[in-house]
Image (cartoon, rainbow, N blue to C red):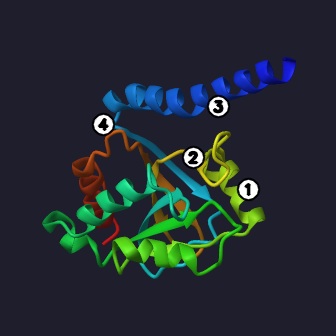
Amino acid sequence: MKNSKYKLFAILLVFLFFFTVPFFQSVLFSTDKQGAIEVNKSVEASFIKSDKKFVLVFFGYVGCKDICTPLLQELNSLYESKEFETLKEHVEIIFVNLTPEIEELQPDLFAKFFNKNFKGIYLSKKETLSIERVFGVYFSKDLSDKTQLNHTDNIYLIENNADNKVLKTIYLTHPLKTKKLINDIIQVTSNKK
């Protein structure tokens, strides 16, 4: 009887954390900076290997149907939009996989399914754990389905310098404010020319 109470309590805590925290983040930040958090902080992100000056990074996992698939489809629409056309030479979209138990090739294949220009990155277990500290990405196995992963779904705009990476802005995706994102990228790319 005790175990079932603890299990129910644990499920309730996970539910509250993964479903109410993003909701409150969206509510809190949707009026402040239009759904974005400005950071401007150097971060350790050696997994980002791009020749572009800026990268949009999304953390998820291969096969995620509820969060990753719709968001990657939305990023594809953004990437293929007329407004983004001139930004393609400066910005790369990168999907970072949070499940190290898959084959190393799968994240890139998953990302390229949505757009041939997207890049998917595989991280080892050690690298995945460091992501949590550096970017504040939260993820854990789903209690009811161990093949699923609960995770945050923010998009990170990173300035990709040769000597360091600078986390410029974190974008909340409930809803993703694409006009704000495009305007921010236009502003940072024009400042760097």
Give the residue number, with chain letter if any, for mark 3: 14
Q: Nearer the viewer, residue 114 or 134?
A: 114
Which is closer to the viewer, label 3 or label 2?
A: 3
**Cα–Cα gap, marks 4 and 1:** 30 Å
Q: Quadrant of residue 44?
A: bottom right
The label shown at residue 121 is: none
Q: Earlier in the sequence, mark 1 or mark 3?
A: 3
Q: Residues within 10 Å of mark 1 (few under 14, many from 20)?
A: some
Give the residue number, with chain letter if any, for mark 4: 34
Kind of residue sitting beneath label 2: His
| Badge 2 element | strand
| Badge 3 element | helix
**Cα–Cα gap, marks 3 and 2:** 11 Å
Kind of residue sitting beneath label 3: Val
Q: Earlier in the sequence, mark 4 or mark 1?
A: 4
Q: Quadrant of the C terminus?
A: bottom left
**Cα–Cα gap, marks 3 and 4:** 28 Å
**Left or right: residue 69 compared with residue 182:** right
Q: Would you place residue 27 above or below residue 104 in this image?
A: above
